[in-house]
Amino acid sequence: MSPRLRLTSTVLDSPEPGVLADFYRHLLGLEETGERDPDWIVLRNPHGGPGLSFQREARHVRPAWPAAPGEQQMQDHLDIAVDDLQAAVAHAVAGGAHVEEFQPQETVRVLRDPHGHLFCLYLPD
């Protein structure tokens, strides 16, 4: 019999975990759990499902987008479904996101959080 496994969180490295926690709380309506630690913060989804966590990494390097030889490559990104792409982009930017110049699809917007992690807002099919 296989053990029971359950994904609870995606962890993002950051030189300032509190800045990212505040951004994603604003963006996604997540709730902070426990005492705020300067090196580790956990946000949970109040509706269930995986949350986000943030750990201090002083040497975090922003990935290149689009990918470029010799640059820090993107290893992952968050996909976030939205019902109104224009309003969702405005909400993200108001919280501190930056819209990337290169946009590969009409129904997707690639943005960066305040520490350079890439995420996509998209209209589901």
Image (cartoon, helix red, strand yellow):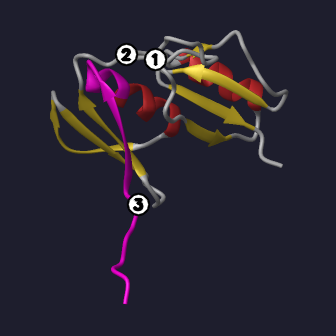
Q: Is 17 inside the magenta-drawn segment?
A: yes
Mark 3 residue type: Leu
Mark 1 and mark 2 in contact (Cβ < 8 Å)? yes
Mark 2 residue type: Val
Mark 1 residue type: Gln
Residue ID for mark 3: 7
Mark 3–mark 2 distance (CA, rounded to whole Å): 25 Å
Residue ID for mark 2: 61
Quarter where residue 99 is shown? top right
Label 1 element class: loop
Q: Position of residue 7 (x, y in %)?
A: 40, 60
Q: Quadrant of the N terminus?
A: bottom left
**Residue found at the very far bottom of the displayed protein:** 1
Mark 2–mark 1 distance (CA, rounded to whole Å): 7 Å
Q: Which one is nearer the viewer's eye here, 47 or 67?
A: 67
Q: Which one is nearer the viewer's eye here, 88 or 124?
A: 124
Label 3 element class: loop
Which is nearer the N-term, disc 3 or disc 2? 3
Q: Left or right of 56: which side holds 10? A: right
**Range covered by the magenta-colored residues:** 1-20
Residue ID for mark 1: 72
